[in-house]
Image (cartoon, rainbow, N blue to C red):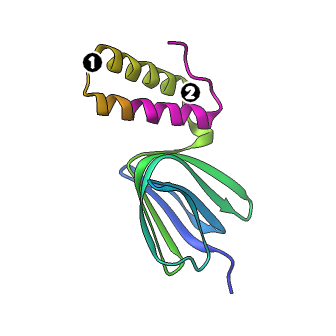
Amino acid sequence: MSKTFHAEILTPVGKLFEGEVQGVQVPGTEGRFEMRVDHAPILSLLSIGHVRVRESAGETGYAVTGGFVEMVDNRLTLLAEAAERVDEIDVERAKNAYQSALKDLEEKTAPAKEAKQALARAENRLKLAGASLPES
C-alpha cells in the first residue's frame, strides 16, 4: 500500500503544484487540518492562511487567500483564489499591500470588509515570509 497520494494546487492563473505527497495541511474555515493517505472524502472551504505540502524530499509552504479543497480516493485538489510559494513571496509588495489596506481602513476609501480582507492577506504573506509588519 502506497504511503503517498496525488495532490494538485490550482489557482485562476494555473497549476502551482502537482505531485505525490505524504500529507497536506490546510487552513479550513473551521480550523487547520491535515489530509493523509486514505483520508475520508472531504470538501472544505479554505480561509486565508498557510498550506503545508509534505513530500518525501521535505515540506513546501504556500500562502493562500481562500478557496476550497477536496479529497476523494487519494486525490487531493486544492482550488485557491490566489496562492504563492512561501519562498517566493515578494516582501516589498506585501508591505505595500499592507500599508494600502491600512490606509483604506483608516480613510474609509474602500468597503471595510474588503479592506480587512486585503489587510489579512498581506499580514499572512508577511508572516509566512518571516517579515515584520510595516510601521504605521
Residue 111 horizontal side relative to residue 127, left or right: left
| Residue pictured at 56% horizontal, 61% vertical | 33
Q: Which segment is the magenta one?
A: 118-136
Up-down: is 43 above or below 72?
above
Q: Classify residue 37 by image quadrant.
A: bottom right
Horizontal and vertical percent position of residue 88: 58, 38
Q: Is residue 2 magenta?
A: no
Q: Is label 2 in a helix, a strand or a loop?
A: helix
Q: Nearer the viewer, residue 57 or 39?
A: 39
Residue 56 horizontal side relative to residue 110, left or right: right
Please name the amino acid that badge 2 sits on. Val
| Residue pictured at 42% horizontal, 29% vertical | 119
Question: How many marks do you count on the picture?
Answer: 2
Horizontal and vertical percent position of residue 68: 40, 59
* Residue carrying label 1: 108
| Residue pictured at 45% horizontal, 72% vertical | 42
| Residue pictured at 54% horizontal, 67% vertical | 7
Q: Which mark is residue 91?
A: 2
